Image (cartoon, coloured by chain):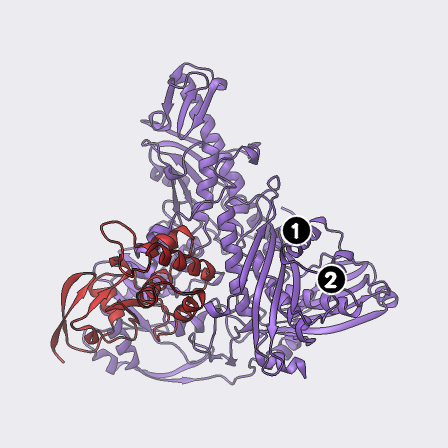
Amino acid sequence: MKKDDYLDLDFYDIGPSIPLNRREFLKLIGGGIVVLFSVGDSLFLEAQRRPGQQLPDDFNAFLRIGEDGRVSCFTGKIEMGQGVVTSLAMMLADELGVSLDSVDMVMGDTDLCPWDMGTWGSMTTRFFGPPLRAAAAEARAVLIELAAEHLQTPPSQLRVEGGVVFHESQRQKKVTYAQLAKGKKMVRRLKKEKVLEKPSEFTIVGTPVSRRDSMKKVTGKAKFAGDLREPGMLYARILRPPAHGAKLVSVDTSAAQKVKGTQVIKEDGLIAVLHEDPELAEEAIKQVKVKWEKPEAKVDENSIFDHLLKVAPKGEVVSQGGDLARGEEVSKVVVEKTYLDGYVAHATIETHTALAKIEGDKATIWASTQNPFGVKEEVTSALGFPAENVRVLTPFVGGGFGGKASNRQTVEAAKLSKLSGRPVQVAWTRAEEFFYDTFRPAAVVKIKAGINGQGRLTLWDYGVYFAGERGSQHFFDIPHHRTMSFGAGWRGTPGSHPFGTGAWRAPANNTNTFARESHIDILASEAGMDPLEFRLMNLKDKKMIRVLETAAKKFGWTAAKAPSGRGYGIASGIDAGTYVAHMAEVNVDKKTGKLEVKRVVCAQDMGLSVNPAGAKIQMEGCITMGLGYALTEDIHFKGGEIFDLNFDTYEIPKFSLIPRIETILIEDRDVAPQGGGEPAIICMGGVIANAIFDAIGARVLQLPMTPERILQAVS
Amino acid sequence: MDKTIRFKLNGQPKSLPLDRKRMLLWVLRTDFGLTGTKYGCGEGFCGACTVLVNNEAVRSCQLPVEDVDGKEILTIEGLAKNGKLHPLQEAFVKYDALQCGFCTPGMILNAYSLLVKIPNPTQKDIVEALDDNLCRCGAHTRIIQAIQTAAKGMKGGSQR
């Protein structure tokens, strides 16, 4: 894998893996015809491997044609709303020649599914798709061989449709997959990816299909981790500090003990109450008398940016070319600005939840998580159990966006179950969810850039602090340029962030795209040019030109120098291999700073779109979620104390905020599928900032763009 | 406060002995195993716990269960009748008006309550009625489409 490819994914914290016990594993698989394969992200893993770390060198997914003819795909990936339970099944059905209804996806069960790194980075379709299709093609070849023998017909004369193999000219000469798989136990290992069919031959892939999980979700039957019950299960409430870094001075649980039926646990700093009734557990935790010592608060949401610049480590060059000094010489106008971005929360509606059941030295954990195998590792090490005795299952996950790559609640449930001898459910309250969320890091971007007398970009000196590298590289045609990243990765460096930070939908790219696209717009304005024309003139990347032109056509963009008073904004970017261009129309009240987003258009080129219906849903979701970080979402804090602990002060997008949204997928069926869950969110800061400038001539340099900040920019 | 309250839950008569103040959300999720009603924020800000009490959408995390004495409660599990989906449920499926699905029961029940009051709501009516039901995945536009379609299908009749 090329460096650029994995940099784009930007995932730095992969834990040590638990090697597979292949023989044990194969025993579990059962009868039928099985094809084992490796998901392509293992290449990515290899590229990121830490010294001494062992990685699975064997298969990490497989499919099975059961003796009943049903097709199952087993994978450690999980479904959290992004729709892969549908898109992966579509790919499999197409390649194998069966109906979509006959495919089952078995996901996120660490006993049934081989090891997987986790579900994030818009990687599932990109890296899972090709080997899944190759494995399905292998299975199909095996089935055709068996059918040829069964029907006494050369394989070349056989065709497959709906799980039935038949003679091409005598359709009555046929045999079903179920008949072929009956009584068999065949295991094949996919050696390498085969040359696949042309996308034009797909019948299911590329056609819009409705979600397969919606029936359960509209009837209340879909089970999330908090909906599961085990006999004797207790609900836990855990004592939490008032601030990150606070030290426990004294604790008295005697009053809590008096709430009838309460079990109090105190062990190594884990202080919790357990009860059969969740409300009585809540009642009991309130009775705990506790004294904390809060550390001195050094930073808050205003001083954090200076702090970050002060503690930033030495920068790393992401890319460079030409000579910056020369660039400055040949520039007619040079503009220097600093862009700021605050902390934002994942704020999934389902809070972190886990149910743990310990029997002897065996543990079963049901978790709302994006990486069940990560949970398995954490629980295994917390309990000191043998790895093969820990099973993690993943029911439906109520949103992730990167936040459920962090699994603290699973270890809490496991420890409490072990200590109490009962199954224990830990379901975080909304306040706990905000407190322990791994926020998108606050970040600073400094840009110094120039243009010549013809409006050509001549200089680009870019430094991003603490957001991360993803999306930091510009894609314009600039002779003298350098992109630096300081404090790369989202977890920060020691002493940088006063609480946990982590990956947040399209990590780093939201911050980087906001800064770049704002700055490009400023330069367009300096050049006296229409912002679209300015971009097109400074671009050589044909794909980027195409998405911009597609968005402009749909939007009905007409050339005008900003500020035109129309409130039109534009921004574009690349994320997870996918190109996006956004245009927006806003109304700004100059007196109050109040903003109305009227319309957002987004054009996206993601190569072959496996499920166009699902891809469009993801685009709409991205645009909507992006409005939050652009306009309202900001964590207020002082040191390790978080002030936003519910949705009253932390405002996520509501119905009344949602503009008219139009999405366009650019057909690019001969290019492999690229990421779809994140790209369309990256432009939302930039497109709105540029629309505000076009409306009232005020430039907002900090996210979120609240009415106060818009007013500040006006004056 | 030892007493027994009686109410109808998804059409079935139920009784519940009470010895303390309890919220409807937890009674539904624990005593009756109706886990389609979700905990989202615990303070009435998100709407994931919305159920119908006498056809009115309420936040069950904020409603003491004694207040439903003598009333009718409908949860998401009681909306489909004899395996046939309610038009709202059908429309949510048809328009892919969900992603993770965690807010979906609350959205559907709040929409139901809206259609009881306003059988043919405008987009503005829907936005106002559902504004405090939060969805993090961003299914809003499709939820509005689904509700409008369901309203048309129900031809002004709030009940099936």
* N-terminal label among 1 and 2: 1
Whether residue B97 appears in this view of the structure is: yes
Q: Which mark is residue A553?
A: none
Lateral position of residue A271 relative to residue A190, left or right: left
Q: Amino acid at mark 2?
A: Ala
Q: Which mark is residue A3?
A: 1
Q: Residues within 10 Å of mark 2 (few under 14, many from 20)?
A: few
Residue A544: x and y in percent read 69, 53
Q: Residues within 10 Å of mark 1 (few under 14, many from 20)?
A: few
What color does chain B have in the rendering? Answer: red
Q: Which mark is residue A559?
A: 2
Distance from the alpha carbon under mark 1 to that under mark 2: 39 Å
Write down the chain letter for disc 2: A
Q: Secondary structure at mark 2?
A: loop
Number of the front mark, 1 or 2: 2
Residue sitting farthest toward the front: B155
Instruction: Locate the C terminus of chain B and report the quarter of the image it occupies.
Output: bottom left
Residue A177: x and y in percent read 37, 28
